[in-house]
Amino acid sequence: MDIQQLRSWIFELYDPLENDRQYIVFDADRGNLVIDVPRYSERAVRLMRGTGGLALILVTNAARGREAARLRDALGVQVAAHEEDAAAIEGGADVVLKDDELIRPDARVLRVRDGARGATVVLLRKAGGVLVVGDLDLTSAAAKGLLGLDFSTILAAQQPPIWAAAKDALLVMQRELYRPRKRFGILLDAPWDRGYKGRLEDKMYHNDPIVPREVTIGREAGMGPETLVVADTTREKMEQAPRPTRDTAS
């Protein structure tokens, strides 16, 4: 497990073997907000303490809550969870949340559901709006309800952060964004042109009647091999035709 500071206000705990991410929102005045927790280890505890004072751990689903109790004891902080997930935390949650609550002035907690399963997402009041979704599947019906929120960034547990145009990315995942058909531009050969070129490469030699000889001038080459004799004859007749002379007497 490692840690990196993504922005001045947020850290990412990252486990490359599990491709798993948790986030710590830095706040020197209120204490840091930890969104989801990694598996318990001494290294994880040291990394989390290294970001500064911790005030609250927020778990986004019941599975994340199973590790929260050990980290709560090790770090000496409170744990917040939705009322549907509170029972998964040993000893219960210190802060029990409803479907839509403001847990801090800069953090709004919302509950989304896909059938019987529910997940908690956090909307942070940062530039453009930052949505922390935890383990939520962004292609699911539950994630579709997030499209009504204002945000430009998505931070998820199982994929790298989407820092720009995150709502458009979510629309694509939900198959709601119109995707124009691919077109071939003037700078890109069409596939059939590339294939045709390959079929002609074995014809590019001068013994082949399709390809004019080097001595052929450009105008005649454009007419094709069948018209070269006609072109030569026509030119010779035009050159032999009498031309008007200048009458010097007049």
Image: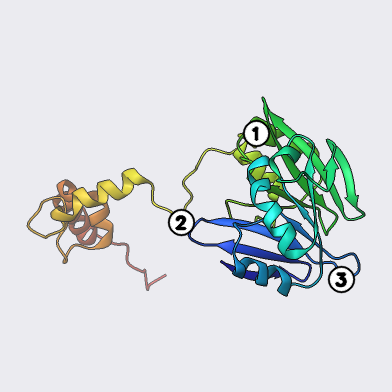
Q: Mark 2 touching mark 1, by CB under 8 A?
A: no
Label 3 sits on what residue type? Ala
Residue 211 vertical placement versus 99 (above, below): below
Quadrant in the picture for the N terminus = bottom right
* Residue 198 seen by the camera: yes
Residue at horizontal 65%, vertical 55%? 162
Residue at horizontal 14%, vertical 54%? 202
Query: Which tag is nearer the camera, tag 3 or tag 2?
Result: 3
The residue furthest top is 115
- Callout 3 secondary element: loop
- Callout 2 secondary element: loop
Disc sitting over residue 187 in the figure: 2
Disc sitting over residue 28 in the figure: 3
Of 37 and 202, which appears nearest the observer? Answer: 37
Q: CA distance from mark 1 to mark 3?
A: 40 Å
Quadrant in the picture for the C terminus = bottom left
Residue at which label 1 appears: 176
Residue 194 x/y as whole percent: 30, 50
Of 3 and 138, which appears nearest the observer? Answer: 3
Q: CA distance from mark 3 to mark 2?
A: 53 Å
